Amino acid sequence: MQAVDVTPRVWDRILAVRSGQACACCGRFSAGERAALDLYGPVARRDLGPVTVAQIGQSLDGRIATMSGDARDVSGPDGLAHLHRLRALVDGVVIGVGTALHDHPRLTVRLCSGHDPARIVIDPRGRLPDDAPMLAATGARRIVVQGVDRPRPRGVEILRLPLHDRQLDPSQILDGLRTVGLGSLLIEGGGTTITGFLEAGLLDRLQVSIAPLIIGAGPQGLTSRTPVDRLKDALRPDTRVFGLGSDIVFDCGLGDLAARCMLPVHSKHPLRQVPAAG
């Protein structure tokens, strides 16, 4: 496990990588700073094309909330900072309408330096109220992906897509967002939304942040709609493990694009390809 140390100077370098003004390989850094470059560099880079990464925070027993729905403190302080860093490195952050209605997230960058990403909600039937915090005008783009003819406040973009069994197709969502200029995306939640993109084979990376607490009951993080019967058929992504202090991150590579990013950014060894998810 690599212990991550996100010092101000290494975070400045990572932001420079995101803006195309620096590489993630050169320079003298401590082992902890180098681990930070290994963790965040693949998300920050733009030279390999668009990256779709999902992140989910959960307990030791795989829960993302209590039975009453309390999910505020599942991630520790370092896990929350990690989430905000990911937001700062992508072009847009995506959540499902259930998460937007229950958690009232702002989806802004507050625990680190960096620009706010575009805020995107998948709302098939137009349930999200117009005064939701994530639709507040703060300068960042706001996009509602919906399958119904429902107007939105001025400044909120609408991506209208066809419904399939009252749901929206993840592949069409991803294609639509890329069409409107959003390359690298963070699928932030909830578990059902992340699973939809995972099972459609659309994720380049999956990051699972685990905090040291046991909840005992409540919704699980990732629940497949098509579970395997035999363990030999289970998805086994190439995985690296990072220590963030209060949380541990499992950084999983999925597909050929992720394989090109999975190697530590300073390594010069040939890459081993991994099969695409799906």
Image (spheres, rainbow, N blue to C red):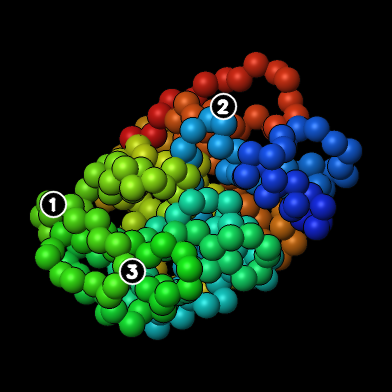
Relative depth, front residue between 5 and 245 = 5
- Check disc 1 and report its element: helix, strand or loop: loop
Q: Is residue 271 above or below residue 80?
A: above
**Secondary structure of residue under mark 3:** loop
Mark sitting on residue 162:
1
Residue 259 on image: x %, y %: 54, 28
Mark 2: few/some/many CA within 10 Å (<14, 14-19, 20+): some
| Residue holding disc 2 | 260
Q: Nearer the viewer, mark 2 or mark 3?
A: 3
Q: Which mark is residue 223?
A: none
Amino acid type shown at disc 3: Gly
Give percent across and percent down for residue 147. 16, 59
Q: The residue under label 2 is which amino acid type? A: Arg
Which residue matches tag 3?
155
- Marked residue nearer the N-terminal end (1 or 2): 1
Q: Is residue 74 left or right of residue 28?
A: left
Residue at x 55%, y 72% (from the top left corner): 74
Q: Say if mark 2 contacts mark 3, CB within 8 Å.
A: no
